[in-house]
Image (tube, rainbow, N blue to C red):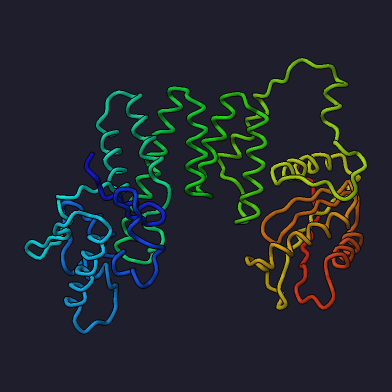
Amino acid sequence: MEKELKANMFGSFSLSYGGQLLNGKNKSSESGFISLMEAILHAGKEGISRDELEQAIFQNADLKNIHHSTRNVIYNAKKRLLSAGLPDVNYIEQKNGIFYWTDEIPVNEDARQFEQLIEAAHAEKNINKKTGLLLDAIHLYDGEFLEAQASVIWIAKEARRYRELFCECVEEAARLLKEKEEWFVLEDLGLYAAKVYPFSEWESITMEALIAMSKYDDAIRFYEETSEYYMSVMGLRPSQRMQELMNHLGDQINHRYEVLDEIQAKLMEDDPHKRGGFSCSYPVFRGIYQLTERNMERGGQSVFLMLCTIVDSKGNPMKEGNMLDELTDRLKSAIYSSVRRSDVVCRYGKGQYLVLLSNTTMENCRIVQKRINDNFLIGRQRTGVHYFVNSVFCRYD
């Protein structure tokens, strides 16, 4: 079998021949070789002009004789390829000012193969084969095009184009899988797409598949884990589509027949003597808040919503950093040990918590804040917590 030069462009760039890796770890000493090979191999049979090649290799470097520098990079690359075991041929050919990779050594580039699979899928009439080709293309894409060189203009343009192709593939494959009711494959597709591009709302595909397979417990768990992940990392809530699926989920759950005592036992907390506030995910917190509003129609309750935000020494909200992660965990402990068992707590984002305080007063809210500060602040700690409190009112009058 004829050996081929294998070039991986998605994610981290790698170049190998006969199983031997030709590039190192993107060290500055070999950046010229890497930039040359990325550009010349990706250009394919169309080739690349001298100006484009020089721009790809040197970016905007101020060189006195850029043509001479380019010839040096090509010369050193040829020596390196030969010493790596490639056949002794003219690897990089030049015709009429256009540079080409030689036809004598075949190239297997994942980005080009990705496009070929998509083209084949678009031309395929058989739905099963079409879906298979799309899934093959999707799983070939395991990261941004040359992600380590995202600041390079030509690479940034290609990365955007491939990202759009990937998203179109996912949407088309998901549509076909839903039509064929291949829910297991759809679940895997959503998980893979979300892994490649977190926070792109692909989780809704997995959620839809779990519901279609009647995996209700898995769907609820997946939604809560996704919600917590969005909140903790980005301070975001899941997509509107995810929330819609969650809202409809309750209507579809059918438990096996049980007597009331058995059902009630499952609804109770595992540890009825657990101290501190009631901890829950944002979706559950939202439901409790809405129920509280409804219960207030009967009157007699005084409920407050409190937002606790970690701030720096200047009083500005902290939004990132390793220190923030440690402070967020400490704030969590401080809140749970400062509120009653009947109060509800959820993490809203990095450095932020929501607390629903029932049957209390504004004065008692200030007492809770003082308790949280006493449990949170250590020594001469310069960071602190800002509190924002609103009264919960009934909107149904």
Q: Which residue is nearer to you in this view: 62 or 30?
A: 30
- Residue, x 75% and y 50% (percent of image)? 346
Query: Of all residues shown, which one is farthest toward the bottom?
Result: 64
Q: Is residue 3 left or right of residue 25?
A: left
* Whole-percent x, y for residue 329 in the image: 75, 59
Q: Is residue 164 left or right of residue 252?
A: left
Q: State which quarter of the image contains the C terminus.
A: top right
Q: Is residue 126 above or below residue 164?
A: above
* Whole-percent x, y for residue 325 in the image: 69, 62
Label count reads 0
- Residue, x 63% and y 33% (percent of image)? 219
Q: Which residue is nearer to you in this view: 117 or 337?
A: 117
- Using the rendered view, name the quadrant where residue 25 is placed: bottom left
Q: Which residue is nearer to you in this view: 2 or 166?
A: 2
- Using the rendered view, name the quadrant where residue 57 is placed: bottom left
- Residue, x 76% and y 61% (percent of image)? 308
Q: Is residue 169 left or right of residue 182?
A: left
* Whole-percent x, y for residue 116 in the image: 26, 40
Q: Which residue is nearer to you in this view: 27 or 236?
A: 27
